[in-house]
Structures are given as structure tokens and as C-alpha cells.
Image (cartoon, grey):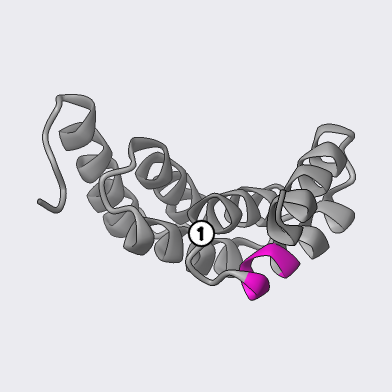
């Protein structure tokens, strides 16, 4: 197991216990070790959203969908982030991509 994966597991444990600050700090370390780590960006975005850091959550969500543009959950999460931020046009666009994927389509081929 790599350092990144160990940190990710620890972060998930903190998240499960409701320890958002600890989880966020560890997720940040994961993505600093591996900027291409989709799961780290996705989890960091969701944890930040839970903690009320909506703008930063959106940045992480955008990084996640950039790394894996055909991930249904990443687009769904990004849509929720935009809704929380009050940006309904972007939320609808992200939701549209999620809908395409849920029907078996692709956002990027």
C-alpha cells in the first residue's frame, strides 16, 4: 500500500466518524502526493461540501470530472456543489452530463 492509499484510508476513517477537518487535511495530502488521484479529489470535494467550503469543493469537483469525465457520481456531486453555491445553470449542465452517463452514454469518448 502506498503512502497515498494509506492516507486515503485514514481520511475515510475520519470521515466515517464525522471528523471532517481531519479527513479534509488527509485528503489534501493525498492529492498533493498524487495530483492525478481521482478518488482523492472526489472525496475532498464532498468533504469540503459537507463542511460548507462550497467554492473550494467546486474546484475539487471540477478536477475530478477533468480526470474522469465519464464518472456518473463525480458529475452528480458537482451538480450538488453548484446547487449549494446557487449556480443553477452550471448545476443543470453537470446534471445533464450525469443523465447522459446514467443512460449509458459518454461525456467524452
**What secondary structure is the magenta-colored segment mainly?**
helix
Q: Is residue 87 left or right of residue 13?
A: left
Residue at mark 1: 85
* Residue 90 percent coordinates (x, y): 30, 58
47 is higher (above) or lower (below) than 59: above
Q: Residue furthest front?
A: 1
41 is higher (above) or lower (below) than 74: below
What residue is shown at x 81% (from left), y 33% (from top)?
16
- Residue 32 sits inside the magenta stretch: yes
Identify the element where label 1 is drawn: helix
* Residue 60 percent coordinates (x, y): 52, 64
Q: Is residue 75 left or right of residue 44?
A: left
32 is higher (above) or lower (below) than 53: below
- Residue 23 sits inside the magenta stretch: no
What residue is shown at x 41% (from left), y 45% (from top)?
74
Q: Is residue 109 left or right of residue 75?
A: left
Which of 73 and 79 lies nearest the eye of the viewer?
73
Q: Is residue 10 left or right of residue 40?
A: right
Q: Which residues are magenta?
A: 29-33
Amino acid at each position: 500500500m502506498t503512502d497515498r492509499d494509506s492516507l486515503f484510508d485514514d481520511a475515510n476513517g475520519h470521515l466515517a466518524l464525522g471528523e471532517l477537518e481531519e479527513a479534509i487535511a488527509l485528503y489534501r495530502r493525498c492529492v498533493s502526493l498524487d495530483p492525478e488521484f481521482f478518488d482523492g479529489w472526489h472525496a475532498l470535494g464532498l468533504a469540503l461540501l459537507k463542511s460548507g467550503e462550497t467554492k473550494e469543493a467546486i474546484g475539487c469537483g471540477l478536477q475530478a470530472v477533468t480526470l474522469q469525465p465519464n464518472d456518473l457520481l463525480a458529475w452528480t456531486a458537482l451538480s450538488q456543489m453548484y446547487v449549494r453555491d446557487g449556480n443553477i445553470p452550471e448545476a443543470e449542465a453537470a446534471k445533464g452530463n450525469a443523465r447522459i452517463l446514467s443512460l449509458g452514454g459518454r461525456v467524452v469518448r
